[in-house]
Image (cartoon, grey):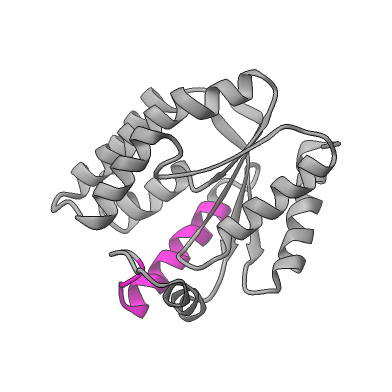
Amino acid sequence: MTQRKFITFEGGEGSGKSTQARLLADKLLALGHEVVVTREPGGSPLAEKIRALVLQSKPASPEAEMLLFAAARAEHLHVKIKPALARGAYVICDRFIDSTRVYQGRMGAVDPAFIASIERAIVDRFMPALTFVLDVPAKTGMARAAARGELNHYDDKDLSWHAALREAFQNVAKDEPARCVLLDGSRAAEQVAAGVWRAVQQRMGQA
């Protein structure tokens, strides 16, 4: 089951997810809605500690990495996402289940059936109603990530890896068109934001 006011942003490194999450939140706040902006991995105190652990010291086992992120998601949902949705707030999350499917699944070769079973147990009916997949050329995303500084072990992969990552996220959008909207994240932030808002209005009705 999807949650009507739950929106996620997905994409490779440097695709503009955080920027677009903030711009959408500003738009909804200006209309008088309560908005909770959060991120994964992280989003709650314990989940943020798990995020720091994994990004600083990559587990040798892709399955271990996936399970750590799953634990962070379970905590995040319980502490922040579910309570916000229950009181009628919009929740905008920078990364969610699709990042697990792509990073640990398609890129890390963790069995998709195993990921799906964990996902069912943790996410259950708290699926996003709308997911924006921001698409940028691998070289552009890498340059943006490098400009931010403090590269993690995902940012520091080579160009071919990031190109494969981009394709994997494109496939996410193709596989679930009812939920996902693929947008050109290489355009100016204001142009991307306009596309995001059009989709929110079309897919979710009057905001």
Report the side of 207 relative to 6 (left or right). right
Judge by depth and name the residue closer to the eye, 32 or 129.
32
Q: Residue at x 29, y 41 (%)?
A: 50
Is 124 drawn above or below residue 205 in the view shown?
Answer: above
Q: Residue furthest left?
A: 60
Judge by depth and name the residue closer to the eye, 133 or 90.
90
Report the side of 46 relative to 22 (left or right). left
Q: Residue at x 39, y 35 (%)?
A: 45
Q: Residue at x 39, y 26 (%)?
A: 122
Mark yes or no: residue 116 visible.
no
* Secondary structure character of the magenta stretch overall: helix
Judge by depth and name the residue closer to the eye, 22 or 96.
22
Mark yes or no: residue 185 visible.
yes
Residue 184 image offset from top left, x and y in percent: 65, 68
The mark total stands at 0
Is 121 drawn above or below residue 67 in the view shown?
Answer: above
Please state the extent of the stretch shown in magenta in the rendering. 155-174
Report the side of 160 relative to 127 (left or right). left
Q: Is residue 58 magenta?
A: no
Residue 25 image offset from top left, x and y in percent: 70, 46
Judge by depth and name the residue closer to the eye, 183 or 17.
17
Q: Residue at x 83, y 43 (%)?
A: 30
Is 189 drawn above or below residue 1 in the view shown?
Answer: below
